[in-house]
Image (cartoon, rainbow, N blue to C red):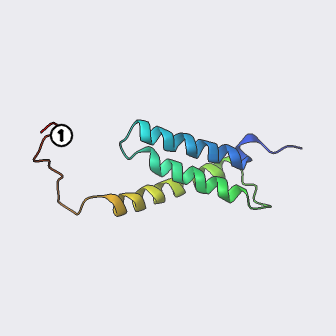
Amino acid sequence: MADPFWLTWWLWLAGALALGILEIVLPGFIFLGFAVGAAVTGVLLVIPGLTPSLPILLLIFAALSLIAWLVLRRVYSLPHGQVKTFRHDIND
């Protein structure tokens, strides 16, 4: 019997790629955490014998996405209280 589609590892990696491309097209630092969560979920599904149910798999994806988003925000954000200002125009 074939595995359900949500247990197909390459679909999760394809979803991660699509979310990464969406982050490039619509920048806002929103989809990057979801892309990392989907990629790690896809890699976890490669492990033989790991066949979680859909609710457990979605919980894993959500937790990994949240952790990735928090880590990326901490690493790539401006220092606390600092605001990015531009003193010159790109056309000058």
Residue 30 place in picture, x, y as percent: 41, 45
Furthest toward the front, the residue is 92
Furthest toward the right, the residue is 1
Q: Quadrant of the N terminus?
A: top right
Q: Residue at x 16, y 36 (%)?
A: 91
Left or right: residue 92 versus residue 32 is left
Q: Residue 2 lies in what quarter of the image?
A: top right
Q: Residue at x 36, y 57 (%)?
A: 73
Left or right: residue 8 versus residue 40 is right
How many labels sit on residues?
Answer: 1
Residue 6 place in picture, x, y as percent: 70, 44
Q: Quadrant of the C terminus?
A: top left
- Mark 1: which amino acid? Ile
Residue 16 place in picture, x, y as percent: 57, 46
Residue 34 place in picture, x, y as percent: 50, 48
Left or right: residue 68 versus residue 27 is right
For mark 1, what is the residue? 90
- Of 29 and 59, nearer the camera is 29
- Of 16 and 63, nearer the camera is 16
Q: Secondary structure at mark 1?
A: loop
Is residue 91 shown above or below 44?
Answer: above
Is residue 46 shown above or below 15?
Answer: below
Q: Residue at x 77, y 42 (%)?
A: 4
Q: Residue 52 lies in what quarter of the image?
A: bottom right
Q: Residue at x 55, y 39 (%)?
A: 18
- Crowding at dot 1, Cα within 10 Å, few <14 / some 14-19 / many 20+, comes out as few
Is residue 37 shown above or below 17?
Answer: below
Left or right: residue 83 versus residue 59 is left
